[in-house]
């Protein structure tokens, strides 16, 4: 049966400085492009029938670098975007805490899927749009197809929840490095997680801290 290959984009300057990116259109930095080159070599012998990407620059560039040598058009979909963090985008955790004491702790607390940054999305909303992508993509492809999806930390968590038929309370159980690989295999009666947050293709100096 086919597979879903889930890739998080390479590093950006805002990843490095721990600023909340959300849907701000930040590009890969030099480390991010180097990470993706290692990832591309990891994937070069794996057959892929389709490639999907968030429409933000850091994911689309990751998809293009990963797709080098493949005669496959990259389809972009805004439903694969990261959380919108509204007024928090561009800020560090320390800056958010100074503006709204206790807000970050509230967001990260278990069972708080309805919490959203001011003007941003909550976990339910992200999961709903990513489920829409999964449903459309599953209808478009045969279960034997191998699909590469390049997305963000939040939307990859949502993909795992949607594809594996987990609950929204499982959303924050997953940690994800930049340029990591997850593999989910289709079966006739569902899907199985084969690999998660695999960064064995990255040298130690190019590994970031997972979110």
Image (cartoon, grey):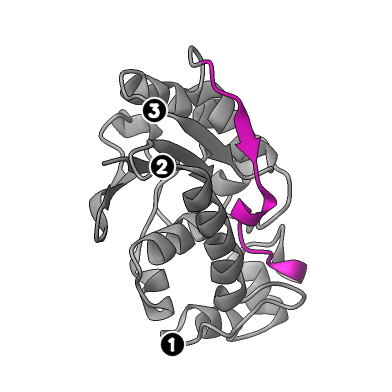
Q: Secondary structure at mark 3?
A: helix
Q: Looking at the image, which residue is at 38% across and 77% down?
A: 167
Residue 63 image label: none
Whether 203 is among the magenta residues is no
Position of residue 40 measured from the top left corner of the image (x, y, whole percent):
41, 23
The answer to which of marks 3 and 1 sits earlier in the sequence is 3
Q: CA distance from mark 2 to mark 3?
A: 26 Å
Mark carried by residue 111: 1
Whether tag 2 and tag 1 are in contact, CB under 8 A, the answer is: no
Q: In the rendered image, which quarter is residue 101 located in?
A: bottom right
Q: Locate residue 206 relative to residue 154 in the image: left or right.
A: left
Q: Could you say which disc has been placed on residue 142 in the image?
A: 2
Q: Which residues are magenta?
A: 71-86
Q: CA distance from mark 2 to mark 1?
A: 35 Å
Quadrant where the N terminus is found in the figure: top left
User: Please, is residue 138 above or below residue 181 in the view?
Assistant: below
Query: What element does badge 2 sit on?
Result: loop
Give yes or no for contact between labels 3 and 1 (Cβ–Cβ under 8 Å).
Answer: no
Q: Which residue is mark 3?
A: 39
Q: Are marks 2 and 3 in contact (CB under 8 Å)?
A: no
| Residue 159: percent from left, percent from top | 45, 58
Dot 2 or dot 1, earlier in sequence: 1
Label 3 crowding class (10 Å Cα cut-off): few <14, some 14-19, many 20+?
many
| Of the pair 117 and 92, the residue shown nearer to us | 117
């Amino acid at each position: 049966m086919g597979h879903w290959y889930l890739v998080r984009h390479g590093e950006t300057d805002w990843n490095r400085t721990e600023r909340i990116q959300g849907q701000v259109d930040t590009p890969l930095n030099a480390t991010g492009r180097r990470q993706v080159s290692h990832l591309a070599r990891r994937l070069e012998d794996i057959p892929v029938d389709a490639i999907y990407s968030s429409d933000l620059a850091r994911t689309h560039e990751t998809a293009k670098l990963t797709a080098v040598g493949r005669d496959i058009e990259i389809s972009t979909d805004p439903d694969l975007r990261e959380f919108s963090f509204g007024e928090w985008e561009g800020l560090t955790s320390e800056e958010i805490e100074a503006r709204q004491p206790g807000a970050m702790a509230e967001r990260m607390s278990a069972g708080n899927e309805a919490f959203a940054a001011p003007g941003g999305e909550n976990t339910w909303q992200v999961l709903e749009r990513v489920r829409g992508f999964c449903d459309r993509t599953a209808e478009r492809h045969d279960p034997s197809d191998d699909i590469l999806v390049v997305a963000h930390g939040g939307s990859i968590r949502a993909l795992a929840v949607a594809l594996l038929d987990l609950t929204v309370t499982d959303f924050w159980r997953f940690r994800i490095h930049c340029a990591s690989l997850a593999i989910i295999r289709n079966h006739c009666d569902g899907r199985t997680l084969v690999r998660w947050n695999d960064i064995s293709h990255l040298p130690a100096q190019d590994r970031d801290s997972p979110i």
